[in-house]
Image (cartoon, rainbow, N blue to C red):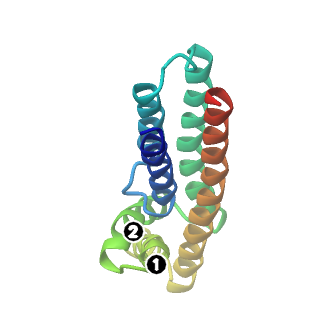
Amino acid sequence: MEIVYWSVIVILFIIGFVGLIYPIIPSVLFLLAGYILYGVFFSFEPFGWFFWLIQSFFIILLFIADYIANMVGIQKYGGSKAGVWGSTIGLILGPFVIPFLGILLGPFIGAVGAELLVNKRDFKSSLKIGFGSVVGFISSVITKTIIQILMIVYFFLVVL
């Protein structure tokens, strides 16, 4: 049964990484579910207050990294709050509307559309801002991947 338990935990961690690409999947919840299932299957003993403090710190970093990377990516290219909101909406809807490329095209189209419609920017400036949203998304994924790897490595250091 131990192999089945570990398989379930590892699958939850993998789903957490899939959530980096598909933001509709709450990555953090799958990582936390893996920790909790470890406790249920094996023992909660390794998870002292310090473990939860460190994991909480990483969770806060995940949310900050996500927000800042998107915002900086758009604002660096001259975008506004409308561009950030358009990019965020596109990020959520994109994968459903355009199955494979929607994860990149969604934020781009959302940011471009918001800048064109809300701020009445010219098309060239809006395209530049849309590009910034894609740069922000990719930066966010890279940063969150590193943070989630650190979370899982710390988990394994504690339990093994």
Q: Position of residue 29 (x, y in %)?
A: 41, 41
Residue appearing at x 56%, y 85% in the figure:
124
The furthest residue to the left: 97
Q: Residue at x 58, y 20 (%)?
A: 46
- The secondary structure type at the circle numbered 2 is helix
Q: Name the outermost residue toward the bottom.
A: 124
Residue at image position (41%, 71%) is 110
Mark 1 burial class by Cα count in 10 Å: few <14, some 14-19, many 20+? many
- Looking at the picture, tell me which residue is in the foreground, 115 or 85: 85
Q: Which mark is residue 105?
A: 1
Quarter holding the N terminus is top left
Q: Amino acid at mark 2?
A: Gly
Which quadrant of the rendered structure holds the C terminus? top right
Q: Is residue 36 above or below residue 47?
A: below
In terms of sequence position, does the residue under pointer 2 or pointer 1 come before the other? 2
Q: Is residue 19 above or below residue 28?
A: below
Q: Which mark is residue 90?
A: 2
